[in-house]
Image (cartoon, rainbow, N blue to C red):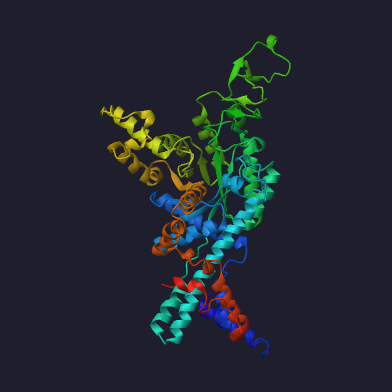
Amino acid sequence: MTYHDNIAQTDQLIAGYNGTWDGISAEAVARMRAQNRFRTGLDIARYTAAIMRRDMAAYDADPAAYTQSLGCWHGFIGQQKMISIKKHFGSTERRYLYLSGWMIAALRSEFGPLPDQSMHEKTSVPALIEELYTFLRQADARELGGLFRELDAARDAGDEVNEQRLLNAIEHYQTHVVPIIADIDAGFGNAEATYLLAKKMIEAGACALQIENQVSDEKQCGHQDGKVTVPHEDFLAKVRACRYAFLELGVEDGIIVTRTDSLGAGLTKQIAVSKEPGDLGDQYNSYLDCEEIDPATAQNGDVILNRDGKLLRPKRLPSNLFQFRAGTGADRCVMDCIASLDNGADLLWIETEKPHIEQIASMVDRIRAVHPTAKLVYNNSPSFNWTLNFRQQVFDAWAEAGRNVAAYDRAKLMSVDYDRTELAAEADERIRTFQSESAKRAGIFHHLITLPTYHTAALSTDNLAKEYFGDQGMLGYVKNVQRAEIRQGIAAVKHQNMSGSDIGDDHKDYFAGEAALKAGGAHNTMNQFAA
């Protein structure tokens, strides 16, 4: 309903109570409804899934229409990100949030900081989704509350032109609520455990679940060693579990992002079941590092494969894990991705060890030969040394082109001594355009940075501590934080308003009228920031 329709409907409702509801303002109800557009997490999941589907179709038509997100580990961080986007760009279109399992483990577990090994409480994942959306909905309520106050002031002043402008802004208000791509790790157990957690995440508002093909109880961060993958049927059972969760809850266009860690994973815990040559199990096993044996030399406990009439023994490590042949990671990634798309995945995630467009594209080209509209979510990871990687890429390109690179030491290109060189400038330009170029060349629909706000929190806190506890004292805060907030128009400089004080005052006015004891009076120190 429109704002006016809401008022009219509520007026009619109030009138039906024979004067006992006359203390209720229909317009106040309409305002509260506008400030609480999403009643449940499922409302959010359905709304944001539709956004992602439209964005995916737009990207298929034009790869310049790629999407982006930053990982956020707290509701306030996600809220401030979206407020900033609306302030600077006027729209939240094609900008999402990412929920990182790494940051939950490191920052939100009751055990304290943990490595990214699925040791944190699984309940903390839906809890953070709910928290993020609570803060985003409050951002809506706060901004709309400001528009309502401006509307009242325009009416009091008899300014009909401004009144109509504000009514139009209210009617066409763009919410801060955007899609969240949420990390469900390797599913936190078997397929049933994955299904149960997926339901909780969707109920909290997640429209997109990202699941990886590692063993749940051996899960590692994608940029650490020791990763262990599972056979496809084990993984696809969890993919189906996520789809069942979406369908059960009525989010029929929910998004499943399947992540393969095979590029850096050289181990498997299981030999895949194979029913016939060439099936998925047989393909998975074909990459195992094996040695041919004579049946007479078979040992107790050996696992033996029969391939083309030969008996092969996969090499088993003391950890009881089996290893893949070196150099097969890219082939296994392609196989993983095709199998995922064949079984209902919507988007792919290939975890790489460096940000190299042609490396990514070489795999995507092979996937698209089977699935022409295959699209990636890509981790622009802080685990990469972007400066060193791209300077080395430029160095290698120059050397291959026959340019003189004698002035550069490839191993030491991170040095500040190279910061003002032509090579560094070209590398920075490649970093700047990495997302747009890889969206065009390598099928990357969504670019995210998994852990950026972890690093920004550490960096900003270090800078403040250095100044405040040093000889700058209070000036270290005032100059570098508060004054910068004022100059840059950071909404949180009015922290009482940001925390909901003005919303509370509005409610007090609705509930008690002139008797309301409000916090926003003349003696509120936030008035010092009115300018």
Residue 231: image quadrant is: top right
Give above or below for 502 relative to 213: below
Residue 28: image quadrant is: bottom right
Quadrant in which the C terminus appears:
bottom left
Label count reads 0
Q: Which one is nearer the viewer's eye here, 478 or 114?
A: 478
Residue 248: image quadrant is: bottom right
Residue 278: x, y in percent? 58, 28
Can residue 344 be seen by looking at this rendering? no
Q: Residue furthest bottom?
A: 19
Residue 495: x, y in percent? 52, 66
- Left or right, 319 with respect to 27, comes to right
Q: Which one is nearer the viewer's eye here, 243 or 314?
A: 314
Quadrant in which the N terminus appears:
bottom right
Residue 134: x, y in percent? 59, 62
- Left or right, 379 with respect to 25, comes to left
Residue 63: x, y in percent? 39, 48
- Residue at 58%, 69% in the rendered image: 36
Give above or below for 341 relative to 254: above
Can residue 194 be seen by looking at this rendering? yes
Q: Residue furthest right?
A: 300
Q: Which residue lies furthest to the top in this view?
A: 296
